Amino acid sequence: MVNIQDLSSLEGQGGILADQAMDPASTLMSKAAPHKHIDARGQQCPMPLLMAKRGLRELESGMVLELIATDPGSERDFRSLERLGGHRVETEVSDDGIYCHRITKA
């Protein structure tokens, strides 16, 4: 779990950029940049899942889609997407309830 307060102490030390410390969504899953990013904050079930499915249509196998959501039910939805769709899904949750789902297309 990423702690935003801990990250702010790294500013100026080559750790993270100052604007990343201020935006919890940008600090989650700080891996290689995704091929597509979708912001579904404020959307309720089933919209984050539908937005992800629509975004995945545009990607080739092995490409990564990152979706940011605030709906707690999205975690369950994306576990089902992984199980039924064969995609690889990694989810992290920030302390303030932002869900970052990274989906690698099957």
Image (cartoon, rainbow, N blue to C red):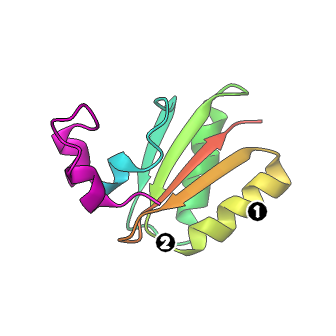
Left or right of 84 on screen, residue 99: left
Q: Position of residue 96 (x, y in %)?
A: 35, 71
Q: Of 51 and 73, which appears nearest the observer?
A: 73
The residue tagged 1 is: 80
Q: Residue at x 28, y 36 (%)?
A: 15
Q: Residue at x 82, y 56 (%)?
A: 83
Left or right of 80 on screen, residue 22: left
Q: Please report the bounds of the magenta region as a residue range.
A: 1-23
Q: Position of residue 62 (x, y in %)?
A: 70, 28
Q: Quadrant of residue 74?
A: bottom right
Assess whether residue 18 is covered by the magenta stretch: yes
Binning the other alpha carbons within 10 Å of mark 1 as few (below 14), some (14 to 19) or many (20 upward) gives some
Residue 43 position (above or below residue 7)? below
Q: Of 21 and 60, which appears nearest the observer?
A: 21
User: Tag 2: residue type?
Assistant: Asp
Element type at mark 2 = loop
* Sooner in the amino-acid sequence: mark 2 or mark 1: 2
Binning the other alpha carbons within 10 Å of mark 2 as few (below 14), some (14 to 19) or many (20 upward) gives some
- Look at the image and tell me in which quarter the C terminus lies: top right
Mark 2 to mark 1 CA distance (whole Å): 15 Å
Element type at mark 1 = helix
User: Tag 1: residue type?
Assistant: Ser
Assess whether residue 73 is covered by the magenta stretch: no
The residue tagged 2 is: 71
Left or right of 76 on screen, residue 83: right
Residue 73 position (above or below residue 80)? below
Q: Residue at x 36, y 53 (%)?
A: 25
Q: Residue at x 74, y 56 (%)?
A: 81
The tag on residue 30 is none
CB atoms of marks 2 and 1 within 8 Å: no
